[in-house]
Image (cartoon, coloured by chain):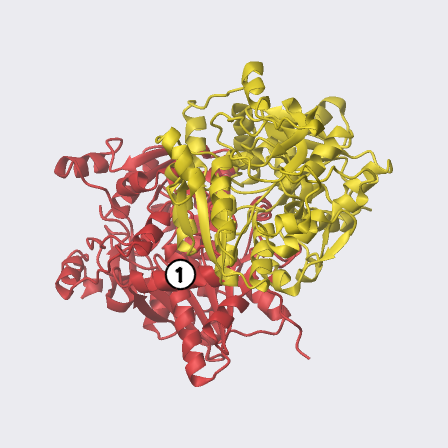
Chain colours: A yellow, B red
Amino acid sequence: MAQKIPTRLYLSEDEIPKFWYNLRADMTEKPDPILHPGTLKPATAADLEPVFCKEPVKQELDDATRLIPIPEGIQEFYRAYRPAPLIRAYFLEKALETPAEIYYKFEGTNTSGSHKLNSAAAQAFYAREEGLSSLTTETGAGQWGTAMAMACAFYGLKLTVYMVKVSSEQKPYRKALIETYGAELIPSPSNTTESGKKILEKDPNTGGSLGCAISEAVERAVKSDKCRYVLGSVLNHVLLHQSVIGQEAKAALDKYGVKPDIIIGCAGGGSNLGGLIAPFIGEKITGKSNTRFIAVEPASCPSFTRGRYAYDFGDTAKTTPLMRMYTLGNGFIPSANHAGGLRYHGMNSVLSKLYKDGCLEARSEVQTGVFDAAVRFMKAEGILPAPESSHAIKAAMDEALECKRTGEKKVILFGLTGTGYFDLTAYMAYNTKTMTDHIPTDAELEQGFASLPDIPQNK
Amino acid sequence: MAQKIPTRLYLSEDEIPKFWYNLRADMTEKPDPILHPGTLKPATAADLEPVFCKEPVKQELDDATRLIPIPEGIQEFYRAYRPAPLIRAYFLEKALETPAEIYYKFEGTNTSGSHKLNSAAAQAFYAREEGLSSLTTETGAGQWGTAMAMACAFYGLKLTVYMVKVSSEQKPYRKALIETYGAELIPSPSNTTESGKKILEKDPNTGGSLGCAISEAVERAVKSDKCRYVLGSVLNHVLLHQSVIGQEAKAALDKYGVKPDIIIGCAGGGSNLGGLIAPFIGEKITGKSNTRFIAVEPASCPSFTRGRYAYDFGDTAKTTPLMRMYTLGNGFIPSANHAGGLRYHGMNSVLSKLYKDGCLEARSEVQTGVFDAAVRFMKAEGILPAPESSHAIKAAMDEALECKRTGEKKVILFGLTGTGYFDLTAYMAYNTKTMTDHIPTDAELEQGFASLPDIPQNK
């Protein structure tokens, strides 16, 4: 007889992963290299080290080592809030009357409210080990800024957060939390950097953008020997750190002999999805499994589903190395959407390669539909989800309803990346039916594509 | 060799309590009975049932049954968010350089953000079982209102929440969350009740009070056959439901052979503290243990430390039965304090009796000191605590520092009742040093005492 599966599948502390799982090692075809924007040659560690910490740079460029040890100093931090629960969605299954089994890995039980802390801990630890005294970063929705503020408080580092101005005004409590953890918060664009000043000169009333905040944070970091820049998504080393999500989920499912048929994650820069699928996708790549992997993105910022596979900059000031990825163009300005964490023009290059090679599916959802799903979920499961995470909920519910139609008893696993405590303005808009959807027109997309670098690799 | 104690001591789903622990059964001297305010005779079930649900009334009056079974319909709800973690505060111990061992039972991992859900689940379940269609309640800080909204969404009941007007204005996100769960939220005082109208006539601009919101919710409930009133603290049945906190904490500690020397909880109406100490205090009462039990209350609302042990009403409209308790008088108006959940004039009568009999200690703390402790805690442990819970943190830290002074290796257990996601206005006041402390003068206390009922029992 099958063992009864509990509602919350906790692991013990000993079962927190001791290695990160580098999914690039499982890829038979590797993603294209990062390019130096000047020489258009593959970027070296020396190219990246003025901006990023040394160990993350090494991880960024390593596509061969499958298991990378997690230093004890990071494991110690992980023990403060991990293992994160894997939850069997019995209540949601009942509400949907589906024969499907639904599981979700819930990363929102820590105070930063999301999975971002997994990489923040790692990046702050390495900065301290390298003898740095401070870090800079940017934050849009605020999850990453909060996570970095927590990690820097723990490891004793100074942190400056450039927060997209409109976000810092809409989310005063996010700002308060980041400041309570002792970080300096600067609404971006600001006059503390050249790139900020340039943007303010053009448009003094701009609400800012993630790309612009990245430019400011990078500029500030490279001006000091003792300071580096940290990024919360998009890059390979961030996906690597997030592999604790997938590994814990797999370990918990393995205990009960459960194998997911469908694995779903929301995708902005891709770090959560990349971390969730890390230990699962190898078998798919080698044709040994039929598991489906689904990325869900907002219809207002559809990098996968309507973007181009091209080399592009990670920021609007065009200062970062070039990455080959699905992108809407660094100049694409996504319309306002309550899932601030998914408003990014590009996508991690590993996930982009997997999508190109047919190992990963993608779909886009409008936010009113996403919030319909979020509210149904929270009433059934009792957890207030972040708008970003709710994209995955929407797809999981759709797949479960499809099972109801066909009578199939599929196993669905999705990533519930975070909580919506700081997103109640969005829920208020939903409750009062003032939430609207925007799907970019083809002409709007063309404007974004026009910003793609005009280089031979993009021909 | 002693077993290594993990940072998070989770129990398995099978270990969620199947009985509530009624600590009154362990008391050799029972608390004085609740009195009918008209007859001044002990209140009967028939007196209480027009207001409250039947099964909770039975539990309210039962001071003999030690273990009361938790119905499967409530256990099912508990499985959605329990067991709650017991956490060994390794990081805080290190930060304080104390030889003490500190543990805290963290009840904030559910979406309502506090322990209140433990009783909300029970009360909503019994209402549904009784065939009721709706419930009313009041909420101050908002934790209880959110918990009831979640529970009513789960059990399919209509809920009306009277929220203290000034709170509903200061905490729009709390309001949004309660409404997203489908409850009707009415800022109190309102013109939906006679008691509300009366107060508004006197002072149209009043911000309301908890006592007034209680009066409105009770009035609304008694006007309908299919509606009852639910309360989130103070009453014995609420403490009973909260005994899952103490039982889980004890079960987790027992696994490692750990016995607490000091158990600490914040105290407003007393439900969290009563639940935490439930399975521990019997040995103290019978002289078999020397464990110290400490209640921590705000200096601005010091029921235990400066109140009188007297019969008093639970609400300002003087409509509830009379309870013998430590009270500042139902007419006492506590000054503004960010720990809204602790702004109550009275105290549960069981805890009052234990305090009177010397089984329980109490102390009061000013809020600036409480927030000093809260911020130190959150930087070390990574959890943003509610202002209410931070009263317990403050006392736990003081006891741990005393151990540092004396070199004693005591075991300290405290209740971390909830998270501070909706209290960031308070943290902002703390960060900007605009937070002030108010300690009532003796004259202010005398004004409150003047409102105590003039009955023989109070002579």
Pick the front one: B433 or B7:
B433
Q: Position of residue A216 (x, y in %)?
A: 47, 42
In this rendering, the answer to whether A149 lies above or below B247 is: above
In this rendering, the answer to whether A253 lies above or below A410 is: below
Pick the front one: B109 or A425:
A425
Q: Position of residue B45 (x, y in %)?
A: 39, 49
Residue B392 seen from this side: no
Pick the front one: B18 or B185:
B185
Residue receiving disc 1: B374
The C terminus of chain A sits in image quarter: top right
What's the residue type where badge 1 is placed?
A: Ala
In-image side of A420 versus A191 (left or right): right
Pick the front one: A186 or A15:
A186
Quarter where residue A283 is shown: top right
Residue at point 66%, 61% (across, down): A13
Residue B414 seen from this side: yes
Q: Secondary structure at mark 1?
A: helix
In-image side of A392 versus A191 (left or right): right
